[in-house]
């Protein structure tokens, strides 16, 4: 049923306002966001990313956005900060290896025009997000995997490096003594940075990058590099990104679902909550896992929701970079 609110929401999302956005930001930790018709102008520029370490990514993205740069450059440069952080054991260099001790990285990127690129199980390259962008811009394909992705990266001038740090190697050696895999919610599930940006023109871009689950089976790929699962952007509507157990996100095609719900008139918060409900419905052991979503619509309204408590995210808008706790299904 098309209500007046939904109609106004859809109309607002379908238009590109010329004015710069205001500084007021809808609170994402509330059950529902502010009604779209109450917002005078879109919030822009804006950057939102998963987990508290996303604040560092936001800072890098904001420098580009605040100087008039575009959303695509901002989102790439933002997540690159986390890929280069050796202390982060879930993204880029220093990421936890698979069961064989190999660090394999996954990443995808989406541009405002709908173009996208992805790499899966990429080894030896610190910045898989930049390789994903090259796939998008330099090839007729969307996804390159494994050795083919590495060959492409080297041909594009990327440097081959050892991604297994001494700290990650020591943790892997310790794990091998038992070879027992017991995911720790909100600790080991910090397996992704997903990021969405809106520039001054109102264009939206997204990126997602990860080293995947620690000590995974060789060849395992989660949701992060899968367009529509770990990330999805529609410049007419908004964007969404996921974090947590990739297998559960893939089953629900989570990020695409969030964006489509927003297209139908749901607020970003409502869309994230419904997506979590779909994940729970399709994953019987949901009490033992974490899945979280972030979302932003064309107006700059944001949403975030997760299965378990403990999921947080970072938002940079109106000159302020804040880490917020998301609401959750399980209290």
Image: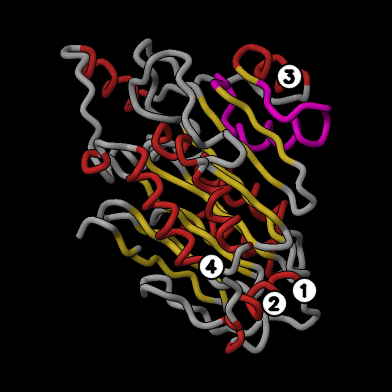
**In the displayed structure image, the side of residue 186 where residue 240 appears, left or right:** right
User: Marks 2 and 4, Cα distance to the nearest angstrom?
Assistant: 12 Å
Residue at the spot x=67%, y=72% of the render? 10
Q: Residues within 10 Å of mark 2 (few under 14, many from 20)?
A: some
Count of numbered circles in the view: 4
Front-most of 169 and 190?
A: 190
Residue at the spot x=42%, y=75% of the render? 32
Describe the element under mark 3 as helix, strand or loop: helix
User: Marks 1 and 3, Cα distance to the nearest angstrom?
Assistant: 39 Å
Q: Which residue is mark 2?
A: 12
- Where is 258 relative to 210, above or below? below
Which quadrant of the figure contains the C terminus? bottom left
Of label 3 and label 2, which has the lower sequence position?
2
Q: Which residue is mark 1?
A: 15
Q: Which residue is mark 4?
A: 266
Q: Which residue is mark 3?
A: 152
């Amino acid at each position: 049923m098309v209500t007046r609110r939904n109609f106004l929401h859809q109309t607002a999302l379908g238009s590109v306002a010329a004015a710069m956005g205001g500084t007021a930001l809808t609170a994402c930790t509330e059950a529902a966001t502010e009604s779209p018709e109450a917002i005078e102008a879109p919030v822009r520029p804006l950057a939102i990313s998963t987990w508290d370490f996303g604040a560092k990514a936001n800072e890098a993205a904001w420098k580009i956005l605040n100087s008039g740069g575009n959303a695509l450059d901002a989102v790439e440069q933002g997540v690159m900060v986390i890929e280069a952080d050796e202390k982060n054991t879930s993204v880029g260099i220093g990421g936890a290896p698979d069961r064989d001790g190999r660090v394999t990285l996954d990443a995808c990127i989406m541009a405002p025009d709908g173009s996208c690129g992805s790499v899966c199980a990429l080894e030896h390259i610190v910045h898989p997000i930049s390789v994903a962008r090259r796939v998008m811009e330099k090839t007729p394909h969307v996804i390159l995997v494994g050795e083919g992705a590495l060959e492409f990266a080297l041909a594009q001038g990327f440097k081959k490096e050892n991604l297994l740090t001494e700290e990650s190697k020591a943790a892997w050696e310790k794990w091998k003594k038992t070879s027992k895999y017991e995911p720790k919610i909100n600790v080991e599930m910090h397996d992704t940075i997903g990021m969405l940006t809106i520039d001054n023109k109102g264009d939206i871009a997204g990126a997602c990058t990860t080293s995947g689950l620690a000590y995974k089976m060789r060849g395992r790929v989660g949701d992060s590099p899968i367009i529509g699962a770990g990330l999805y952007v529609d410049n007419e509507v908004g964007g969404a990104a996921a974090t947590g157990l990739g297998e559960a996100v893939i089953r629900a095609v989570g990020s695409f679902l969030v964006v489509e719900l927003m297209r139908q008139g749901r607020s970003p918060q409502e869309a994230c909550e419904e997506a979590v409900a779909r994940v729970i419905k399709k994953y019987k052991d949901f009490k033992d896992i974490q899945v979280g979503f972030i979302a932003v619509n064309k107006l700059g309204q944001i949403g975030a929701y997760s299965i378990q408590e403990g999921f947080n995210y970072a938002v940079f808008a109106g000159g302020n970079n804040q880490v917020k706790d998301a609401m959750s299904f399980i209290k």
